[in-house]
Amino acid sequence: MLILRSALFNLLFFTLTPLFSLLLLIARLAGRNPAWAVARAWSGTILQLARLICGIKVVVEGREHFPDTPCVVVAKHQSALETIAMPLLVPPYVWVLKRILLHIPLFGWALWAIDTIAINRGTPRQALKQLLTEGQQRLQTRWVVIFPEGSRSKPGEKLPYRPGGVILAQKAKVPLLPLALNSGRCWPKRGFIKRPGTVTFRFLPLIDAETVAGSSRDALLQQIEQQIETACAELLQPDRL
């Protein structure tokens, strides 16, 4: 039954996502807000299907830590679920992602249409320069979401944290908002099978702009890493599912 439920969900996901991507491209002609509305509709539809078909429930904690102005969200990355849910989790934002994702027909084009910051990881210096230039521009009106590990990790696994998000927040003089999660327990990395359970997205206490500006890059990165990994370990406890 688990295989059948997962197969049905995957079929619907890979059918609906290109359709929503096309709708977003059309809506973008009318402006950024209509396109964002389509993105949120896609997010809500897929999460509803995940709940009804796969038994995956989403819980959000820590919204009280949200600032009133744009910030940099530094998030753990365990599955595709957080990329799907994000339009419903935070105010209008832009992703920092691999440029190669823009080559995916329809979905990649939709990512381009909503002004993502698409970097080439093969040229780290140029990628950082692009992140700082485009990131500071986007942060004037929108949030920026970045995965400091650069790619998905398995539950309980920690990849090296990269400082791009910290450097951007310091340059732009904006707060940092860490995000912990346990999505990999229900939606494994590159996994076909989707397992029932509760996925918790936990926003941790905000690091305000003054603290960001007055701290060293290494100290901030270490602080964020420790906070996120500690919270993720708590969320992976059996009683959280």
Image: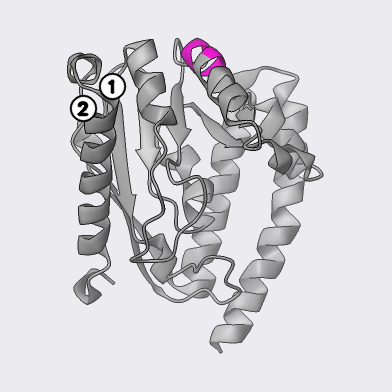
Please, which colouring scheme is shown? one colour
* Residue 116 x, y percent position in the rendering: 61, 28
Which quadrant: the C terminus?
A: bottom left
Q: Quadrant of the N terminus?
A: bottom right
Give above or below for 115 relative to 228.
above
> Quick check: can you spot residue 91?
no
The residue sitting at 24% across, 62% down in the picture is 233
Label 2: state its secondary structure.
Answer: loop
Q: Residue at x 20, y 34 (%)?
A: 64
* Residue at the spot of label 1: 175
Q: Are marks 1 and 2 in contact (CB under 8 Å)?
A: yes
For the residue carrying disc 2, how many other residues have a C-alpha within 10 Å: few (<14), some (14-19), or many (20+)? some
Q: Quadrant of residue 230?
A: bottom left
Label of residue 222 in the image? none
- Residue 134 counted in the magenta span: yes
Tell me: 148 left or right of 95.
Answer: left
Q: Which residues are magenta?
A: 133-137
Q: Nearer the viewer, residue 19 or 3?
A: 3
> Residue 50 vs residue 239: left or right?
right
